[in-house]
Image (cartoon, rainbow, N blue to C red):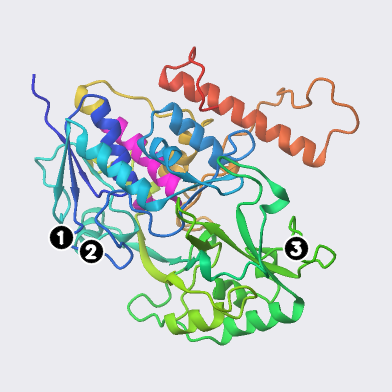
Amino acid sequence: MSIDPIHIVGGGLAGSEAAWQAAQAGVPVVLHEMRPVRGTDAHKTEGLAELVCSNSFRSDDAETNAVGLLHAEMRLGNSLVMACGDAHQVPAGGALAVDRDGFSAAVTAKLEAHPLITIVREEVTGLPPAEWDQAIVATGPLTAPSLAEAIAAATGADALAFFDAIAPIVHFDTIDMDTCWFQSRYDKVGPGGTGKDYINCPMNREQYEAFVQELLDGGKTEFKQWEGTPYFDGCLPVEVMAERGVETLRHGPMKPMGLTNAHDPATKPYAVAQLRQDNALGTLYNMVGFQTKLKHGEQVRVLRTIPGLENAEFARLGGLHRNTYINSPTLLDGTLQLKSRPGLRFAGQITGCEGYIESAAIGLLAGRFAAAARLGRPLASPPPTTAFGALLGHITGGHIVSDDEPGKRSFQPMNVNFGLFPPLAADTKLKPEGFEGRFRGKDKAVAKKKALTARALADCRAWLGRESQATAAE
């Protein structure tokens, strides 16, 4: 018996994951990707699931970190993004970072080889036509203007937008390692790492304050069409952070805590700029937290004032791209369907989640929901106690507030975090067996996170029908 396909618009992380999940469920998929027919301001290749900002999937700690928990849940769900990420990881301390080219090539190859997936290189300029009765829009932060306008017209809502900023990438052999040193913060060893996974560039107080002033004075990209659009706090340009106070960077991406200068252990740095390996060869390093809207010439000048980067050569300079997302709590139901048009789902960053893994996770859910609908087997939403459910809950109903209620705030993008999870039951035992001494502060906080993740993984296994299966995901 033939099964009509699910049409997916957008071959980024969310669209690629959605296509994989639906096809693995036995449903044909047509994946529409506009590159290379039409490019974007941020993409450089025509590969599926291209990573345009950082190459990090962030923390891989599934016990005490919500992002690491989401990694584990996705592995339990046989995620294509996680499988390819694990296969192409590069050292990054406690984080899971990947060789971006190898990762994209692997995702593309898997999707191209799947017998139920057809990839069509074309731009879809409007909402999916009515005959695409099961469809997913996963066009991400770089949704083409024509499609964004069609979405806005169909939903009756104005498109919301903010800027994401891209961090520069430096050629390793142009970094002065007589000044810089390798070390992960607190010597933390993560997947594929050694505890020495970051390059650290030290600054004394005078150098740091001069650098902050250069950021403030440097020439920046002027906003015209999108003037006044707010930034997402999790991805602020470095000079915007500098505008918030001279100490802001030193307590953010340039904090010196947990680091000891290997060349001068007795002198504690006042601030530290970090670079993380960006490719498997170790020839490229990206500047952690250094998203920027400085003009390219100014970037080179200002960044070369950082000790150790005086002669740095840049494989890619930073830049800005637009991020468009919809008012999902108002527009989408609990299975990511547009309330005004059942069968049409949205996935990825366009729904108002933030981050690579969050986008892929929402793609995973959308693909499973669409496949279940096509097969006539309704799928319950993941429990809110799981990372899947917590993120989905934020998107589809996280903080709806009526227009006349004091303190009303608009829907904003969000990374997965423990604040989105329901609280633990009052009788949950947190204190470990044999623990001696006062149980509070950091010990209690860590125990609470472990209890949240244990509950989440148990509930996720139940939702996936894998209660009895022990896996390496945990």
Residue 194 position within the rendered picture, expressed as x and y whole percent measured from the top left: 63, 45
Residue 395 position within the rendered picture, expressed as x and y whole percent measured from the top left: 42, 45
Foreground pick, 196 / 140: 196
Residue 261, numbered label: 3
**Amino acid on which disc 1 is placed:** Val
Foreground pick, 169 / 456: 169
In the structure shown, which secondary structural element does the residue marked by tag 2 occupy? loop
Which mark sits nearer the N-terminus, 3 or 2? 2
Which mark sits nearer the N-terminus, 3 or 1? 1
Query: Does the magenta-highlighted stretch encompass residue 368?
Result: yes
Q: Nearer the viewer, mark 3 or mark 1?
A: 3
Foreground pick, 147 / 57: 57
Question: Where does the magenta region start and end?
Answer: 349-370
At 27% from the left and 37% from the top, the residue drawn is 110
In the structure shown, which secondary structural element does the residue marked by tag 1 occupy? loop
The reply to whether residue 318 is in sight is no
Quarter the C terminus occupies:
top right
Q: Tell me where residue 158 sits by quadrant.
A: bottom left
Q: Which residue is mark 1?
A: 37
Residue 115 position within the rendered picture, expressed as x and y whole percent measured from the top left: 17, 30
**Amino acid on which disc 2 is placed:** Gly
Q: Is residue 208 above or below residue 101?
A: below
**Amino acid on which disc 3 is placed:** Asn
Q: Circle 3: is it few (<14), some (14-19), or many (20+) Cα within 10 Å?
A: many
Q: Is residue 323 left or right of residue 441?
A: left
At 26% from the left and 20% from the top, the residue drawn is 377
Q: CA distance from mark 3 to mark 1?
A: 49 Å
Q: CA distance from mark 3 to mark 2?
A: 43 Å
Residue 39, numbered label: 2
